[in-house]
Image: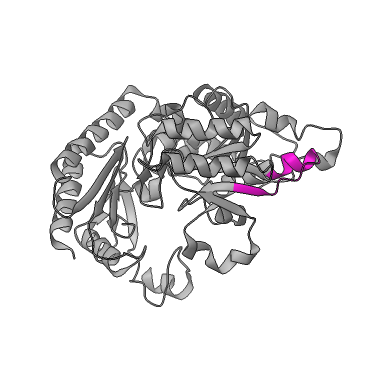
Amino acid sequence: MLEIDNQYLWHPYTQHKTAATPIAITHGEGALLWDENGKQYIDAIASWWVNPFGHSNIYIADAIYKQLTTLEHVLFGGFTHQPATTLAQRLMALLPSNQKKLFFSDNGSTAVEIAIKASLQYFYNQGVKRTKIIAFENGFHGDTFAAMAASGISFFTEAFRGSLIEVARIPVPTKGNEQASLDALKQLVTTGEYAAFIFEPLVQGAAGMVMYEPEALDTLITICNDNQVFTIADEVMTGFGKTGKTFACDYLTTQPDMMCLSKALTGGTIPMAITTFTQQIFDGFYDDDVNKALFHGHTFTANPTGCAAALASLELLNTSEMQTNIVRVNSRHLAFKSAIEKHPRVKTVRVLGVILALEITREGNEDYYGNFRNKLYDFFIGKGIIIRPVGNIVYILPPYIISDEHLTAIYENVTEAVETIY
């Protein structure tokens, strides 16, 4: 397997000249994965945040199988089908009440791409020139061009700097920075040049699980509303229970105009994404002039099999057992936070829902993929735990069904890493 991989495959976020040989995984169950040598790993990050209900989930697998025996795929241009309409109905019951329309795509980046394109074209359709967007510093929204432009982690985007739409960045309203964020946004929105403000609500994932309060975001959204600037909540990571509520936006009193959903949408089984819109935005494309339509599409738009997986995932999420699991993981995280946060090498510990992020004190700056980060990663892999630190930040975002025993093993190894890795 590894010989063929080395010969033919190009992995994401990988410098192949210096990277270690990838680990060949053969199967998974629950929160566990096994490699070709039989070594067991605890998946402490739900395989990049997509797998809340565990690997090889039988309930979702059965839903996929049943759908495959009826209708595996049909084009969505000019056609529709029951899995898509049922999923739309179910999601609408969970989404903020101002969300009225769903647009299907394939992954988180494309969900964001669609939201940004819709923002820009909405004003274009009205003959208004608004060609710029606003985003938080150090945000990450994906790797397609508009999503990349909105992202603030420079080494991901440096090679494309001259090819991206113009984005103004404002400070994240973390504790003590609320006023600076507010002032920066006010200055931008009054120019009339900006179509939208995009943000990761309450938690910036790829930045190291940076967290801020809903009250601050409510204020920012209100400012945008007052200045006719659309707001886009990128819930690709935070959606479907990660923050303790179905969506991070459920903590808000003022809701965004658009939401981007993916990752856990299908329980980690089939690539699928959804961008949701208010009626106002949809109406900005509803016209006798065909050129005002949103000319965006994907071959696998609203794939019936993906819709079936998403429906099964929503059913699992809304069970009392799964909601109890989310509360249990959060409680265990909070207990670990209390135990570790006074350690002399721990700078901060942040918890929201099933997300825990721990920042290890280091002298000097630590690169995103620097030596210290790599030491941490190798330490955890050696211990049979899949954790991908961000610089000096170790985060845990496990499947909701993870056992207390496996959580304890994660916490013990994180503690050992804090004490021994320099």
* Relative to 422, residue 18 above or below: below
Residue extending farthest to the bottom is 17
Name which quarter of the figure residue 237 lies in.
Answer: top left
Residue ID at (59%, 65%): 161
Q: Closest to the observer: 399 or 208?
A: 208
Residue 235 can be seen, yes or no: no
Viewed as shown, does residue 125 lie left or right of 195? Answer: right
Residue 274 can be seen, yes or no: yes
Which segment is the magenta one? 120-133
Rendered-image quadrant of the N terminus = bottom left
Report x, y in % for residue 127: 81, 41
Q: Closest to the observer: 392 or 7?
A: 392
* Relative to 254, residue 116 above or below: below
Name which quarter of the figure residue 366 lies in.
Answer: bottom left
Residue ID at (60%, 31%): 225
Asked if the stretch drawn in magenta spans residue 274, the answer is no
Residue ID at (14%, 46%): 342
Residue ID at (52%, 21%): 93
Report x, y in % for residue 17: 40, 78
Tally the marks: 0
Q: Closest to the observer: 90 or 375?
A: 375
Report x, y in % for residue 119: 67, 41
